[in-house]
Amino acid sequence: MSYPTILEVVPGSPAATAGLAAGDELLAVNGVRPSDVIEYQQLVDEDDVEVVVRRAGLDIDLAITKRAGEPLGLRLSESIFDRVQTCDNHCEFCFIYQLPPGMRQSLYLKDDDYRLSFLYGNFTTLTRFTELDLVRVVEERLGPLYVSVHATDPEVRASMLRNPRGATSLRWLRALLAQGVSVHGQVVLCPTINAGDVLERTCAEVVARYPALASVGIVPLGVSRFSTAQRLRPHTLGEARRDLDIVHRWQAVARERLGTRMFYASDELYLMAGYDFPASEAYEGFPQHENGIGMVRALYDELDVLERGTALELPTLTGEWRTIPAAPAEGYRAPRSTGRRADAADGPAVLVTGEYGALALAPIRERLEGLGGREVRILPVRNEFFGGNVAVAGLLAGEDLQRALRADSGPAGVYLVPDVALRGDVFLDDVTLEAVAAAARAPVRAVDATCAGLLGGLAA
């Protein structure tokens, strides 16, 4: 069990007033050594808090005066202080098994920890879930959680997870739902394995046996060029359409029986099938927006609102991590350095994105020009780093962006890169945003993958 380090102390906060500083190791709160940021938050929610920190090798006791419920004002280096519960499954479709060698070690960590599910929306299979975990989740109301269902057929699920416990671990899903814990599910759809008739059975059994699920996301398999699994392959056009038709049919059944559509297919599956995206009402509040489900429709809706000039309401992001101020930001939420942005030059704004992103942006390019008052060009980038059918913007690698920007010969005043591809200041392959910018003929800006973010990037 390690001690978390204080990354940031909010100026003027109770922690700052008491003398806590960035770099201090947090040893205890009110005499308790917390196991994770969730327990830490419960401890510091009290009114007067005593902490023990280690600074320059010395243990220091500090008394902090505050109101009950008032944030202490810290950002910590870790979310889990004891040990992340690692995954003991060996799913052949797991993207970690499809990574190239030599990437940073943290990318190869497979977690199956319900705490990270609660904090960040990570999906857990529940194969390592225990009675003690259930008690804590229920008592502390740690929801929503996110559970990988994949298939309700026990044999199919155990085969997919390559773990015999996969056949029985969904009993924990029933237990969580029976105790009123909010849970979102996911099916990673693999052709010939859990698609087609197996998907049909999964949808039917979800409606019959797990009707309290908040939602079920249906996400197609991504296969990189590094996959060694013989039976894995992408959807064909016909398979994508067949599986979408199954999802739509069971949406209708679920809506009639449960009052909710329950099942939501990812934007990627609609693009694979060449189908139009559903209306916003069909996403029922976008419960799995950050899972790539409804992002394009939300983008189109945002554009409609901006053109009308009415009040803007964006979809609620998944996960509850924002409610715990001390939890470190992960992924694209991680802070980037705040240097001066280079001024855009004359010329169009170039939207640099993945191949799927280009398909989604093409229908609204002229509308963005009208709102932004600037010519817009779209530059799709083929993902050669991962290869296969990987084409989403969030998995763009820095070296692919460098290659595309060096080869781009079109007019450009500024290049806009989606922030979802970044982890702080670096891309998945550890190429920095600065290094990507050095490969371009015009300034490069990372922008939010929203209409407001795009329009902000268009401004000189």
Image (spheres, grey):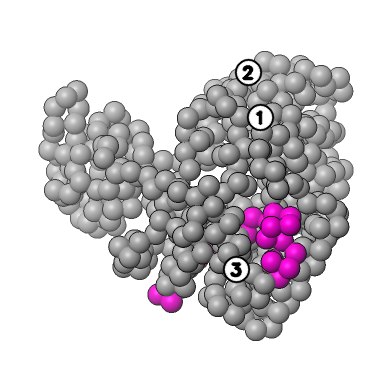
Residue 298: percent from the left, percent from the top? 70, 55
Q: Is residue 260 above or below residue 45?
A: below
Determine the CA span between mark 3 and mark 2: 48 Å
Q: Amino acid at mark 3?
A: Asp
Determine the CA span between mark 2 and mark 1: 12 Å
Q: Is residue 343 above or below residue 294?
A: above
Task: Provide the residue designation for mark 2.
Answer: 435
Nearer to us in this view, 322 or 268: 268
Q: Amino acid at mark 1?
A: Ala
Q: Amino acid at mark 2?
A: Ala
Question: Which numbered mark, 2 or 1, is in the foreground of this view?
Answer: 1
Identified at 81% across, 58% down, the residue is 239
Please provide the residue range marked out in magenta: 178-200
Residue 60: percent from the left, percent from the top? 13, 33
- The quarter of the picture where the C terminus appears is top right
Secondary structure of residue under mark 1 = loop
Task: Provide the residue designation for mark 3.
Answer: 153
- The quarter of the picture where the N terminus appears is top left
Question: Which numbered mark, 3 or 2, is in the foreground of this view?
Answer: 3
Determine the CA span between mark 1 and mark 3: 36 Å
Q: Is residue 134 magenta?
A: no
Q: Which of marks 1 and 2 precedes in the sequence?
A: 1
Counting other residues with Cα less than 10 Å from the Cα at mark 2, is it few (<14), some (14-19), or many (20 or more)? some
Counting other residues with Cα less than 10 Å from the Cα at mark 3, is it few (<14), some (14-19), or many (20 or more)? some
Task: Provide the residue designation for mark 1.
Answer: 397
Residue 396: percent from the left, percent from the top? 68, 33
Secondary structure of residue under mark 3 = loop
Counting other residues with Cα less than 10 Å from the Cα at mark 1, is it few (<14), some (14-19), or many (20 or more)? many
Q: Are marks 3 and 2 in contact (CB under 8 Å)?
A: no
- Residue 417 as seen in the image, left or right of residue 356: left
Nearer to us in this view, 420 or 228: 228
